Amino acid sequence: MDKLLVEGPCKLMGSVEISSAKNATLPILVATILCPYPVKFTGIPDLMDVGTILKLMQSMGVKVERNLNDYVIDATSLTNQHADYLLVKTMRASVLVLGPLLARYGVASVSLPGGCAIGARPVDIHLSGLEKMGAHIEIENGYIKAKCDKLKGAVITFPFPSVGATENIMMAAVLAEGTTVIENAAMEPEIDDLADFLMAQGVKIEGSGTSRMIIHGMKINELKPSPWPYRVIGDRIEAATFIIAAIMSGGDVKVSGFNPDHLKFVLETLTKMGAQLEIGKDFIQIHPSQRLKGGTIETLPFPGFPTDVQAQMMALMSIVDGSSIVTETIFENRFMHVPEMIRMGSKITLKGNSALIEGVESLSGAPVMCTDLRASAALILCALIADGQTEIQRVYHLDRGYERIDEKLTKLGAKITRVKG
Ligand code: EPZ
Protein backbone atom coordinates (compact mmCIF):
# COMPACT_ATOMS: atom_id res chain seq x y z
CA MET A 1 0.00 0.00 0.00
CA ASP A 2 1.41 3.39 -1.04
CA LYS A 3 1.98 6.11 1.51
CA LEU A 4 2.66 9.84 1.23
CA LEU A 5 5.36 11.75 3.10
CA VAL A 6 4.43 15.43 3.42
CA GLU A 7 6.78 18.14 4.71
CA GLY A 8 4.99 21.16 6.18
CA PRO A 9 4.32 24.00 6.43
CA CYS A 10 4.16 25.16 2.79
CA LYS A 11 2.55 28.01 0.87
CA LEU A 12 0.75 26.99 -2.35
CA MET A 13 1.29 29.24 -5.37
CA GLY A 14 0.32 28.94 -9.05
CA SER A 15 -2.64 27.37 -10.85
CA VAL A 16 -4.29 23.96 -10.97
CA GLU A 17 -6.73 22.50 -13.52
CA ILE A 18 -9.51 20.41 -11.96
CA SER A 19 -10.31 16.96 -13.43
CA SER A 20 -13.77 15.78 -14.50
CA ALA A 21 -16.15 14.89 -11.68
CA LYS A 22 -15.90 11.33 -10.30
CA ASN A 23 -19.53 11.44 -9.14
CA ALA A 24 -20.78 12.40 -12.59
CA THR A 25 -18.39 10.14 -14.52
CA LEU A 26 -19.54 6.97 -12.73
CA PRO A 27 -23.30 7.22 -13.47
CA ILE A 28 -22.65 8.50 -17.00
CA LEU A 29 -20.37 5.58 -17.85
CA VAL A 30 -23.01 3.18 -16.44
CA ALA A 31 -25.68 4.90 -18.56
CA THR A 32 -23.92 3.62 -21.72
CA ILE A 33 -25.44 0.21 -20.84
CA LEU A 34 -28.67 1.70 -22.26
CA CYS A 35 -27.00 2.53 -25.60
CA PRO A 36 -26.76 -0.17 -28.33
CA TYR A 37 -23.84 1.66 -29.98
CA PRO A 38 -20.30 2.90 -29.16
CA VAL A 39 -20.24 6.11 -27.07
CA LYS A 40 -17.24 8.46 -27.18
CA PHE A 41 -15.90 10.32 -24.12
CA THR A 42 -13.10 12.80 -23.63
CA GLY A 43 -11.44 13.97 -20.40
CA ILE A 44 -12.44 10.94 -18.31
CA PRO A 45 -10.44 11.19 -15.04
CA ASP A 46 -7.81 8.56 -14.28
CA LEU A 47 -9.29 7.29 -10.99
CA MET A 48 -9.44 3.90 -9.28
CA ASP A 49 -13.24 4.11 -9.09
CA VAL A 50 -13.42 4.67 -12.88
CA GLY A 51 -11.27 1.57 -13.34
CA THR A 52 -13.57 -0.40 -11.05
CA ILE A 53 -16.81 0.53 -12.81
CA LEU A 54 -15.30 -0.19 -16.23
CA LYS A 55 -14.03 -3.59 -15.01
CA LEU A 56 -17.55 -4.38 -13.81
CA MET A 57 -19.05 -3.33 -17.15
CA GLN A 58 -16.45 -5.34 -19.08
CA SER A 59 -17.38 -8.39 -16.99
CA MET A 60 -20.87 -8.02 -18.52
CA GLY A 61 -19.48 -7.85 -22.06
CA VAL A 62 -19.16 -4.09 -22.54
CA LYS A 63 -16.19 -3.22 -24.78
CA VAL A 64 -13.86 -0.47 -23.57
CA GLU A 65 -11.24 1.28 -25.73
CA ARG A 66 -8.96 3.78 -23.98
CA ASN A 67 -6.48 6.37 -25.18
CA LEU A 68 -5.23 8.27 -22.08
CA ASN A 69 -8.36 10.18 -20.92
CA ASP A 70 -10.39 9.46 -24.07
CA TYR A 71 -12.63 6.39 -24.18
CA VAL A 72 -15.01 4.57 -26.49
CA ILE A 73 -17.53 2.51 -24.50
CA ASP A 74 -19.45 -0.03 -26.58
CA ALA A 75 -22.43 -1.77 -24.93
CA THR A 76 -23.94 -2.90 -28.25
CA SER A 77 -24.36 -6.39 -26.84
CA LEU A 78 -23.86 -7.53 -23.27
CA THR A 79 -23.13 -11.19 -22.44
CA ASN A 80 -24.65 -11.18 -18.93
CA GLN A 81 -26.49 -9.01 -16.45
CA HIS A 82 -24.59 -10.05 -13.29
CA ALA A 83 -22.65 -7.63 -11.04
CA ASP A 84 -20.40 -9.75 -8.89
CA TYR A 85 -19.83 -9.19 -5.15
CA LEU A 86 -16.04 -9.06 -5.59
CA LEU A 87 -16.39 -5.96 -7.75
CA VAL A 88 -19.44 -4.34 -6.11
CA LYS A 89 -17.99 -4.59 -2.57
CA THR A 90 -15.13 -2.25 -3.48
CA MET A 91 -17.44 0.46 -4.76
CA ARG A 92 -21.03 1.19 -3.81
CA ALA A 93 -21.74 3.08 -7.04
CA SER A 94 -21.75 -0.32 -8.83
CA VAL A 95 -25.39 -0.65 -7.73
CA LEU A 96 -26.17 1.92 -10.44
CA VAL A 97 -26.07 -0.85 -13.08
CA LEU A 98 -29.39 -2.13 -11.71
CA GLY A 99 -31.64 0.44 -13.41
CA PRO A 100 -30.17 0.27 -16.92
CA LEU A 101 -29.90 -3.57 -16.89
CA LEU A 102 -33.54 -3.93 -15.83
CA ALA A 103 -34.67 -1.34 -18.36
CA ARG A 104 -32.84 -2.95 -21.29
CA TYR A 105 -32.94 -6.69 -20.46
CA GLY A 106 -35.71 -7.08 -17.87
CA VAL A 107 -33.30 -8.92 -15.59
CA ALA A 108 -30.40 -8.09 -13.27
CA SER A 109 -28.49 -9.74 -10.47
CA VAL A 110 -26.45 -7.22 -8.54
CA SER A 111 -24.61 -7.84 -5.30
CA LEU A 112 -25.91 -5.76 -2.41
CA PRO A 113 -23.22 -3.06 -2.03
CA GLY A 114 -22.90 -3.53 1.72
CA GLY A 115 -21.85 -0.70 3.95
CA CYS A 116 -18.67 1.28 3.89
CA ALA A 117 -16.59 3.30 6.32
CA ILE A 118 -19.00 6.24 6.38
CA GLY A 119 -22.23 4.32 6.94
CA ALA A 120 -24.63 1.47 6.24
CA ARG A 121 -25.69 3.08 2.95
CA PRO A 122 -28.76 0.94 2.17
CA VAL A 123 -30.42 0.92 -1.26
CA ASP A 124 -34.07 0.74 -0.16
CA ILE A 125 -35.00 3.94 -2.01
CA HIS A 126 -33.48 2.55 -5.23
CA LEU A 127 -35.37 -0.75 -4.91
CA SER A 128 -38.77 0.67 -3.98
CA GLY A 129 -38.58 3.04 -6.96
CA LEU A 130 -37.86 0.16 -9.35
CA GLU A 131 -40.69 -1.90 -7.81
CA LYS A 132 -43.07 1.00 -8.48
CA MET A 133 -41.99 0.70 -12.13
CA GLY A 134 -43.00 -2.97 -12.17
CA ALA A 135 -39.77 -4.72 -11.18
CA HIS A 136 -40.02 -7.87 -9.08
CA ILE A 137 -37.12 -7.78 -6.62
CA GLU A 138 -35.84 -10.40 -4.17
CA ILE A 139 -32.70 -10.49 -2.04
CA GLU A 140 -31.01 -13.88 -2.28
CA ASN A 141 -27.59 -14.76 -0.80
CA GLY A 142 -26.53 -11.12 -0.70
CA TYR A 143 -27.65 -10.42 -4.26
CA ILE A 144 -30.45 -8.21 -5.54
CA LYS A 145 -32.33 -10.46 -7.98
CA ALA A 146 -34.55 -8.25 -10.14
CA LYS A 147 -36.76 -9.03 -13.12
CA CYS A 148 -39.66 -7.53 -15.03
CA ASP A 149 -41.51 -7.97 -18.34
CA LYS A 150 -41.12 -4.31 -19.24
CA LEU A 151 -40.58 -1.42 -16.85
CA LYS A 152 -43.47 1.02 -16.80
CA GLY A 153 -43.27 4.77 -16.17
CA ALA A 154 -44.49 5.75 -12.68
CA VAL A 155 -44.76 8.70 -10.30
CA ILE A 156 -42.10 8.05 -7.65
CA THR A 157 -41.76 10.18 -4.54
CA PHE A 158 -38.46 9.75 -2.69
CA PRO A 159 -38.49 9.93 1.13
CA PHE A 160 -35.00 11.43 0.84
CA PRO A 161 -33.36 13.05 -2.22
CA SER A 162 -30.91 10.17 -2.68
CA VAL A 163 -28.29 10.89 -5.38
CA GLY A 164 -27.81 7.25 -6.36
CA ALA A 165 -31.50 6.41 -6.29
CA THR A 166 -32.27 9.41 -8.51
CA GLU A 167 -29.63 8.24 -10.98
CA ASN A 168 -30.85 4.61 -10.95
CA ILE A 169 -34.48 5.61 -11.59
CA MET A 170 -33.52 8.16 -14.27
CA MET A 171 -31.66 5.45 -16.20
CA ALA A 172 -34.42 2.87 -15.67
CA ALA A 173 -37.01 5.39 -16.93
CA VAL A 174 -35.20 5.89 -20.27
CA LEU A 175 -36.41 2.56 -21.70
CA ALA A 176 -39.59 2.22 -19.60
CA GLU A 177 -43.04 2.38 -21.25
CA GLY A 178 -44.53 5.83 -20.66
CA THR A 179 -43.41 8.71 -18.47
CA THR A 180 -41.69 8.64 -15.09
CA VAL A 181 -41.94 11.51 -12.62
CA ILE A 182 -39.44 11.65 -9.74
CA GLU A 183 -40.66 13.83 -6.88
CA ASN A 184 -38.04 14.95 -4.32
CA ALA A 185 -35.26 14.08 -6.79
CA ALA A 186 -31.67 14.89 -5.85
CA MET A 187 -30.51 18.15 -7.46
CA GLU A 188 -26.73 17.75 -7.33
CA PRO A 189 -24.89 19.08 -10.44
CA GLU A 190 -23.79 15.51 -11.17
CA ILE A 191 -27.46 14.53 -11.62
CA ASP A 192 -27.86 17.41 -14.06
CA ASP A 193 -24.81 16.19 -15.96
CA LEU A 194 -26.27 12.66 -16.21
CA ALA A 195 -29.47 14.23 -17.58
CA ASP A 196 -27.40 16.23 -20.09
CA PHE A 197 -25.65 13.04 -21.21
CA LEU A 198 -28.98 11.19 -21.62
CA MET A 199 -30.49 14.14 -23.52
CA ALA A 200 -27.41 14.07 -25.81
CA GLN A 201 -28.52 10.50 -26.71
CA GLY A 202 -31.99 11.81 -27.61
CA VAL A 203 -33.80 11.21 -24.28
CA LYS A 204 -36.52 13.74 -23.40
CA ILE A 205 -36.11 14.97 -19.80
CA GLU A 206 -37.76 17.93 -18.09
CA GLY A 207 -36.88 19.51 -14.76
CA SER A 208 -33.34 18.11 -14.47
CA GLY A 209 -31.54 19.89 -11.64
CA THR A 210 -34.86 20.49 -9.88
CA SER A 211 -36.63 18.33 -7.29
CA ARG A 212 -39.29 17.25 -9.82
CA MET A 213 -37.85 15.48 -12.82
CA ILE A 214 -39.83 14.00 -15.75
CA ILE A 215 -38.28 11.35 -18.01
CA HIS A 216 -40.14 10.23 -21.15
CA GLY A 217 -39.54 6.54 -21.91
CA MET A 218 -38.50 5.51 -25.41
CA LYS A 219 -37.61 2.45 -27.52
CA ILE A 220 -33.94 1.42 -27.53
CA ASN A 221 -33.65 2.00 -31.31
CA GLU A 222 -34.72 5.63 -30.79
CA LEU A 223 -31.51 6.32 -28.83
CA LYS A 224 -28.92 7.99 -31.09
CA PRO A 225 -25.20 8.58 -30.51
CA SER A 226 -24.27 12.26 -30.17
CA PRO A 227 -21.82 13.39 -32.92
CA TRP A 228 -19.16 14.63 -30.51
CA PRO A 229 -17.35 12.94 -27.56
CA TYR A 230 -19.02 13.71 -24.21
CA ARG A 231 -17.04 15.68 -21.61
CA VAL A 232 -18.16 15.36 -17.97
CA ILE A 233 -18.38 18.50 -15.76
CA GLY A 234 -15.45 19.57 -13.59
CA ASP A 235 -15.23 18.02 -10.13
CA ARG A 236 -16.62 20.56 -7.64
CA ILE A 237 -15.44 18.47 -4.69
CA GLU A 238 -11.86 18.31 -5.96
CA ALA A 239 -12.08 22.06 -6.62
CA ALA A 240 -13.28 22.72 -3.05
CA THR A 241 -10.42 20.59 -1.74
CA PHE A 242 -7.83 22.70 -3.61
CA ILE A 243 -9.53 25.98 -2.67
CA ILE A 244 -9.39 25.05 1.02
CA ALA A 245 -5.77 23.89 0.67
CA ALA A 246 -4.82 27.26 -0.83
CA ILE A 247 -6.63 29.17 1.93
CA MET A 248 -5.05 27.09 4.71
CA SER A 249 -1.56 27.56 3.30
CA GLY A 250 -2.00 31.35 2.93
CA GLY A 251 -1.19 30.91 -0.75
CA ASP A 252 -2.18 32.55 -4.00
CA VAL A 253 -3.73 29.95 -6.30
CA LYS A 254 -6.02 29.83 -9.34
CA VAL A 255 -8.30 26.77 -9.34
CA SER A 256 -9.93 26.35 -12.76
CA GLY A 257 -11.87 23.88 -14.92
CA PHE A 258 -15.12 23.70 -12.94
CA ASN A 259 -18.32 25.76 -12.49
CA PRO A 260 -18.20 27.93 -9.31
CA ASP A 261 -22.04 27.94 -9.31
CA HIS A 262 -21.73 24.30 -8.22
CA LEU A 263 -20.02 25.44 -4.99
CA LYS A 264 -22.12 28.50 -4.09
CA PHE A 265 -22.76 27.55 -0.47
CA VAL A 266 -19.15 26.52 0.13
CA LEU A 267 -17.79 29.77 -1.35
CA GLU A 268 -20.26 31.85 0.69
CA THR A 269 -19.22 30.03 3.88
CA LEU A 270 -15.50 30.52 3.17
CA THR A 271 -16.00 34.21 2.36
CA LYS A 272 -17.97 34.70 5.59
CA MET A 273 -15.00 33.17 7.46
CA GLY A 274 -12.73 35.79 5.86
CA ALA A 275 -11.31 34.04 2.77
CA GLN A 276 -10.30 36.34 -0.10
CA LEU A 277 -11.85 34.74 -3.21
CA GLU A 278 -12.17 36.12 -6.72
CA ILE A 279 -14.97 34.21 -8.47
CA GLY A 280 -14.68 33.79 -12.26
CA LYS A 281 -16.85 31.96 -14.82
CA ASP A 282 -14.88 28.72 -14.61
CA PHE A 283 -12.29 29.46 -11.94
CA ILE A 284 -11.64 30.76 -8.43
CA GLN A 285 -8.59 32.86 -7.61
CA ILE A 286 -7.63 32.51 -3.94
CA HIS A 287 -5.63 35.42 -2.50
CA PRO A 288 -3.74 35.41 0.81
CA SER A 289 -5.95 36.52 3.71
CA GLN A 290 -5.77 37.34 7.40
CA ARG A 291 -6.25 34.37 9.74
CA LEU A 292 -9.85 33.23 9.17
CA LYS A 293 -12.46 33.20 11.88
CA GLY A 294 -14.60 30.20 12.88
CA GLY A 295 -17.79 29.22 11.06
CA THR A 296 -20.79 26.88 11.29
CA ILE A 297 -21.79 24.30 8.69
CA GLU A 298 -24.53 21.70 8.45
CA THR A 299 -24.27 19.22 5.56
CA LEU A 300 -27.43 19.01 3.44
CA PRO A 301 -28.52 17.75 0.02
CA PHE A 302 -27.71 20.18 -2.84
CA PRO A 303 -27.86 23.19 -2.88
CA GLY A 304 -26.99 22.92 0.84
CA PHE A 305 -23.44 22.45 2.12
CA PRO A 306 -22.05 19.23 0.51
CA THR A 307 -21.16 16.36 2.85
CA ASP A 308 -18.18 15.58 0.57
CA VAL A 309 -16.52 18.85 1.66
CA GLN A 310 -17.21 18.41 5.40
CA ALA A 311 -13.90 16.77 6.31
CA GLN A 312 -11.89 19.32 4.35
CA MET A 313 -13.72 22.17 6.13
CA MET A 314 -12.82 20.61 9.48
CA ALA A 315 -9.16 20.72 8.48
CA LEU A 316 -9.49 24.44 7.77
CA MET A 317 -11.48 25.06 10.97
CA SER A 318 -8.68 23.43 12.99
CA ILE A 319 -6.44 26.44 12.40
CA VAL A 320 -8.82 29.45 12.35
CA ASP A 321 -9.42 32.02 15.08
CA GLY A 322 -12.13 30.84 17.49
CA SER A 323 -14.53 27.92 17.42
CA SER A 324 -16.55 26.27 14.67
CA ILE A 325 -19.40 23.79 14.60
CA VAL A 326 -19.90 21.06 11.98
CA THR A 327 -23.12 19.01 11.82
CA GLU A 328 -23.21 15.98 9.51
CA THR A 329 -26.79 15.11 8.51
CA ILE A 330 -26.22 12.89 5.44
CA PHE A 331 -24.08 9.98 6.69
CA GLU A 332 -24.11 8.43 10.15
CA ASN A 333 -20.38 7.87 10.49
CA ARG A 334 -18.52 10.54 8.59
CA PHE A 335 -16.16 11.75 11.34
CA MET A 336 -13.49 9.06 10.83
CA HIS A 337 -10.92 11.77 10.07
CA VAL A 338 -11.34 13.31 13.54
CA PRO A 339 -9.12 10.97 15.62
CA GLU A 340 -6.36 11.27 13.02
CA MET A 341 -6.60 15.07 13.00
CA ILE A 342 -6.51 15.16 16.81
CA ARG A 343 -3.21 13.29 16.61
CA MET A 344 -1.89 16.23 14.56
CA GLY A 345 -3.03 18.70 17.23
CA SER A 346 -6.58 19.60 16.14
CA LYS A 347 -8.92 20.36 19.05
CA ILE A 348 -12.19 18.63 18.18
CA THR A 349 -15.01 17.38 20.44
CA LEU A 350 -17.70 15.12 19.00
CA LYS A 351 -21.27 15.01 20.25
CA GLY A 352 -23.63 12.82 18.19
CA ASN A 353 -23.55 14.07 14.62
CA SER A 354 -21.95 17.39 15.56
CA ALA A 355 -18.34 18.40 16.07
CA LEU A 356 -16.99 21.42 17.96
CA ILE A 357 -13.64 22.56 16.57
CA GLU A 358 -11.52 25.05 18.55
CA GLY A 359 -8.96 26.74 16.34
CA VAL A 360 -5.30 26.24 17.32
CA GLU A 361 -2.16 28.17 16.32
CA SER A 362 -0.63 25.31 14.35
CA LEU A 363 -0.67 21.55 13.80
CA SER A 364 2.27 19.15 13.99
CA GLY A 365 3.22 16.37 11.61
CA ALA A 366 2.44 12.78 12.66
CA PRO A 367 1.91 9.32 11.13
CA VAL A 368 -1.81 9.13 10.20
CA MET A 369 -4.06 6.67 8.37
CA CYS A 370 -6.69 7.23 5.66
CA THR A 371 -10.10 5.68 6.34
CA ASP A 372 -12.24 6.96 3.45
CA LEU A 373 -11.90 9.20 0.43
CA ARG A 374 -12.69 12.63 1.83
CA ALA A 375 -11.11 11.93 5.23
CA SER A 376 -7.89 11.27 3.30
CA ALA A 377 -8.18 14.66 1.62
CA ALA A 378 -8.60 16.33 5.02
CA LEU A 379 -5.42 14.65 6.30
CA ILE A 380 -3.43 15.91 3.31
CA LEU A 381 -4.69 19.46 3.94
CA CYS A 382 -3.62 19.25 7.59
CA ALA A 383 -0.23 17.83 6.58
CA LEU A 384 0.43 20.69 4.14
CA ILE A 385 0.40 23.27 6.94
CA ALA A 386 1.60 21.11 9.88
CA ASP A 387 5.09 21.66 11.31
CA GLY A 388 7.33 18.78 10.28
CA GLN A 389 6.72 15.52 8.46
CA THR A 390 3.39 13.70 8.17
CA GLU A 391 3.28 10.12 6.94
CA ILE A 392 -0.12 9.33 5.40
CA GLN A 393 -0.84 5.62 5.09
CA ARG A 394 -3.42 3.73 2.94
CA VAL A 395 -3.55 6.41 0.24
CA TYR A 396 -5.48 4.02 -2.02
CA HIS A 397 -8.53 5.67 -0.45
CA LEU A 398 -7.34 8.94 -1.96
CA ASP A 399 -6.57 7.46 -5.38
CA ARG A 400 -10.20 6.34 -5.67
CA GLY A 401 -11.41 9.89 -6.18
CA TYR A 402 -8.51 12.28 -6.79
CA GLU A 403 -6.51 12.19 -10.04
CA ARG A 404 -2.81 12.43 -9.08
CA ILE A 405 -3.49 14.86 -6.22
CA ASP A 406 0.10 14.55 -4.94
CA GLU A 407 1.50 15.62 -8.34
CA LYS A 408 -0.95 18.53 -8.60
CA LEU A 409 -0.07 19.76 -5.08
CA THR A 410 3.68 19.37 -5.74
CA LYS A 411 3.29 21.60 -8.83
CA LEU A 412 1.78 24.21 -6.47
CA GLY A 413 4.81 24.05 -4.20
CA ALA A 414 3.91 21.31 -1.72
CA LYS A 415 6.67 18.97 -0.57
CA ILE A 416 5.11 15.51 -1.05
CA THR A 417 6.82 12.18 -1.76
CA ARG A 418 4.82 9.06 -2.69
CA VAL A 419 6.42 5.90 -1.28
CA LYS A 420 5.28 2.88 -3.29
CA GLY A 421 4.23 0.09 -0.98
C1 EPZ B 1 -23.42 9.93 -3.65
O1 EPZ B 1 -23.49 8.77 -2.85
C2 EPZ B 1 -21.93 10.22 -3.80
N1 EPZ B 1 -21.27 9.10 -4.47
C3 EPZ B 1 -21.30 10.44 -2.43
O2 EPZ B 1 -19.93 10.79 -2.63
C4 EPZ B 1 -22.01 11.62 -1.75
O3 EPZ B 1 -21.48 11.79 -0.45
C5 EPZ B 1 -23.51 11.33 -1.67
O4 EPZ B 1 -24.03 11.07 -2.99
C6 EPZ B 1 -24.30 12.49 -1.08
O5 EPZ B 1 -24.08 13.65 -1.83
C7 EPZ B 1 -21.37 9.00 -5.82
O6 EPZ B 1 -22.02 9.80 -6.48
C8 EPZ B 1 -20.65 7.85 -6.45
P1 EPZ B 1 -27.20 9.08 -1.34
P2 EPZ B 1 -24.92 8.00 -2.69
O7 EPZ B 1 -27.92 7.97 -1.98
O8 EPZ B 1 -25.63 8.01 -3.98
C9 EPZ B 1 -29.09 7.18 2.57
C10 EPZ B 1 -17.62 10.71 -2.30
O9 EPZ B 1 -16.93 10.99 -1.32
N2 EPZ B 1 -29.79 6.29 1.61
O10 EPZ B 1 -27.63 10.49 -1.60
O11 EPZ B 1 -24.65 6.73 -2.01
C11 EPZ B 1 -27.62 6.83 2.63
O12 EPZ B 1 -27.41 5.79 3.55
C12 EPZ B 1 -18.91 9.94 -2.12
O13 EPZ B 1 -17.36 11.05 -3.48
C13 EPZ B 1 -30.77 5.42 2.10
O14 EPZ B 1 -31.05 5.40 3.29
O15 EPZ B 1 -25.65 9.01 -1.68
C14 EPZ B 1 -26.98 8.11 3.07
O16 EPZ B 1 -27.08 8.20 4.49
C15 EPZ B 1 -19.13 9.52 -0.66
N3 EPZ B 1 -31.39 4.59 1.22
C16 EPZ B 1 -27.85 9.18 2.43
O17 EPZ B 1 -29.09 8.53 2.09
C17 EPZ B 1 -31.10 4.59 -0.12
O18 EPZ B 1 -31.72 3.81 -0.88
C18 EPZ B 1 -27.24 9.78 1.18
O19 EPZ B 1 -27.16 8.77 0.24
C19 EPZ B 1 -30.11 5.49 -0.59
C20 EPZ B 1 -29.48 6.33 0.29
Image: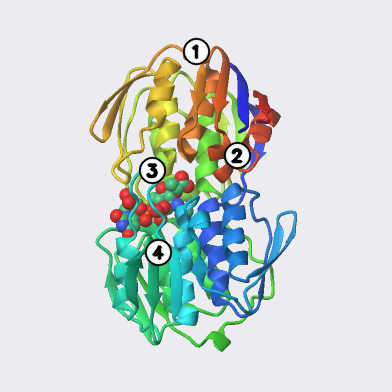
In terms of sequence position, does the residue under pointer 3 or pointer 1 come before the other?
3
Task: Look at discs 1 and 4 and give the one toward the viewer.
Answer: 4
Q: CA distance from mark 1 to mark 2?
A: 27 Å
- In the image, residue 4 above or below residue 202: above
| Disc 3 within 8 angstroms of ligand 1 (CB) | yes
Task: Look at discs 2 and 3 and give the one toward the viewer.
Answer: 3
What residue lies at 66% left-to-right and 35% top-to-bottom? 408
Count the marks: 4
Image x and y of residue 365, in percent: 53, 15
- In the image, residue 316 above or below residue 347: below
Relative horizontal placement of residue 253, taking residue 270 as reference (left or right): right
What residue lies at 64% left-to-right and 65% top-to-bottom? 230
Q: CA distance from mark 3 to mark 4?
A: 28 Å
In terms of sequence position, does the residue under pointer 2 or pointer 3 come before the other?
2
Per the image, the residue denoted by label 3 is: 307
Per the image, the residue denoted by label 1 is: 364
In terms of sequence position, does the residue under pointer 2 or pointer 4 come before the other?
4
Q: CA distance from mark 2 to mark 3?
A: 21 Å
Residue at the far front: name it: 141
What residue lies at 37% left-to-right and 51% top-to-bottom? 303
Question: Where, by quadrant of the figure, is residue 252 drawn?
Answer: top right
Q: CA distance from mark 2 to mark 4?
A: 42 Å
Question: Where, by quadrant of the figure, is residue 134 drawn?
Answer: bottom left
Three-letter residue code for mark 3: Thr
Q: Secondary structure at mark 2?
A: strand
Three-letter residue code for mark 2: Val
Mark 1 Cα shell of 10 Å, populated few (<14), some (14-19), many (≥20): some
| Disc 2 within 8 angstroms of ligand 1 (CB) | no
